[in-house]
Amino acid sequence: MIAETQTIIAISSKIVDVAQSLFRRKIESEAKKELNIIVDSVLSLKFDTLALQEKYTAIQNERDEWKKKAQDREKNLMNLARYERKEIATGVFVRALKPSEKGSEVEHWLCDNCYTDERESTLQWGSASIEGIHYICHRCKAEIIDHSKAPDLQDFAQ
């Protein structure tokens, strides 16, 4: 497309040069009128071609951006596929690395809400209370309480 555009522009320029040369030779007035019409048409074609070239370049850039977004999304989905849903306490769910994916990575959990939105957000330890350990998602502000790690109330009775 770029090569064809450049060819059209070059031919257009030559036609304009020839037309102007003929114009300078003082051709009869009727021929001059026709020549002006040709020159105007060629110049219009040249500007239209340049405008099309700009649009074509913009479309190519947009296509490249969409390709990159698609590649990034595919990479993100492949990473998220490494995780599985895990119930850490009754009714409390997180996303944990599948056993086959752990390797040397430090054990961590992802927020189940963010995972559903195809986002990777690691749950951070917030605090501990009688209810259990509180984990916070800093992206969506969810608070997950791991009731399975609640202190035994008999420890407080003594």
Image (cartoon, helix red, strand yellow):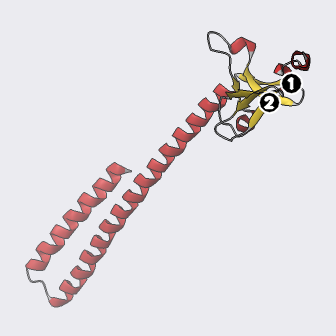
6 up-or-down from 42: above or below: above
* Pick the front one: 59 or 66: 66
In whole angstroms, how far apart are the C-alphas of marks 2 and 1? 8 Å
The reply, left or right, for residue 103 in relation to residue 65 is right
The reply, left or right, for residue 141 in relation to residue 13 is right
Question: Which residue position holds label 1?
Answer: 89
The residue most toward the front is: 158
Q: Quadrant of the C terminus?
A: top right
90 up-or-down from 158: above or below: below
Residue at 47%, 53% (x, y): give it.
59
Question: Which residue position holds label 2?
Answer: 145
Density class for disc 2 (Cα within 10 Å; few <14, some 14-19, many ≥20) is many
Query: Are dots 2 and 1 in contact, CB under 8 Å?
Result: yes
Circle 1: residue type: Ala
Circle 2: residue type: Ile
Element on which disc 1 rests: strand
Element on which disc 2 rests: strand
Q: Position of residue 14 (x, y in %)?
A: 19, 63
Q: Position of residue 8 (x, y in %)?
A: 30, 59
Q: Position of residue 49 (x, y in %)?
A: 35, 63
* Pick the front one: 13 or 153: 153
Residue at 21%, 64% (x, y): give it.
13
Density class for disc 1 (Cα within 10 Å; few <14, some 14-19, many ≥20) is some
